[in-house]
Amino acid sequence: MNHTAHQPQFDRLIAYLSRIPPVEMNDTPSGGVGSGVDDNVWWVKFSISIDHPLAWNAVQELGYVLNYLSASERLPTTFKPVSPPPYMNGGPRDFLSWVIECPVEGISPSKVAEWLKERLPQPVEDASACPESD
């Protein structure tokens, strides 16, 4: 998957995220994913279907790897929810997004894709590889 709306440095990470079952993709050139570099921070923004049975598993796995993996293996990344003002737009089905951010001098988006691939259930597309949702 090569979305021409993104800089090439984001291709591997976006391709990996698109394989995670609850991550929402669409047929637009960007795939429904935003990416860029602002103020020496690169970012990738995407949506997770809150109705998917593994939505919270995906949030938990991504949060674990990207925010805290371990005291000795912390990545310089953050993974967090983002939203425009709900009172002006609507609820989480349509307006809740998730963003991965990292200082440019931290690690590359490609390296983040490698870390995720090495640490998330394998293969990531296989819903049965993920522990049951509570």
Image: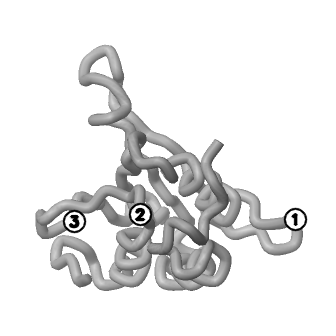
Kindly give the residue lying farthest to the right in the view shown: 72
- The amino acid sitting under disc 3 is Gly
Residue receiving disc 3: 31
- Give neighbour class at mark 3: few <14, some 14-19, many 20+ (Cα, 10 Å): many
- The amino acid sitting under disc 2 is Pro
Q: Position of residue 23 (x, y in %)?
A: 38, 58
Kindly give the residue lying farthest to the left in the view shown: 28
- Look at discs 2 and 1 and give the one toward the viewer: 2
Residue receiving disc 2: 21
How is the rendered protein coloured?
one colour
Question: Is residue 96 left or right of 53 when viewed as pictured?
Answer: left
Tag 3 or tag 1, which sits nearer the N-term? 3
CA separation, marks 1 and 3?
34 Å
Tag 3 or tag 2, which sits nearer the N-term? 2
Quarter of the view holding residue 134: top right
Q: What residue is drawn where x is 67% and y is 76%? A: 119
Taking depth in this image into account, of 105 and 1 the one nearest to the observer is: 1
Residue receiving disc 1: 71
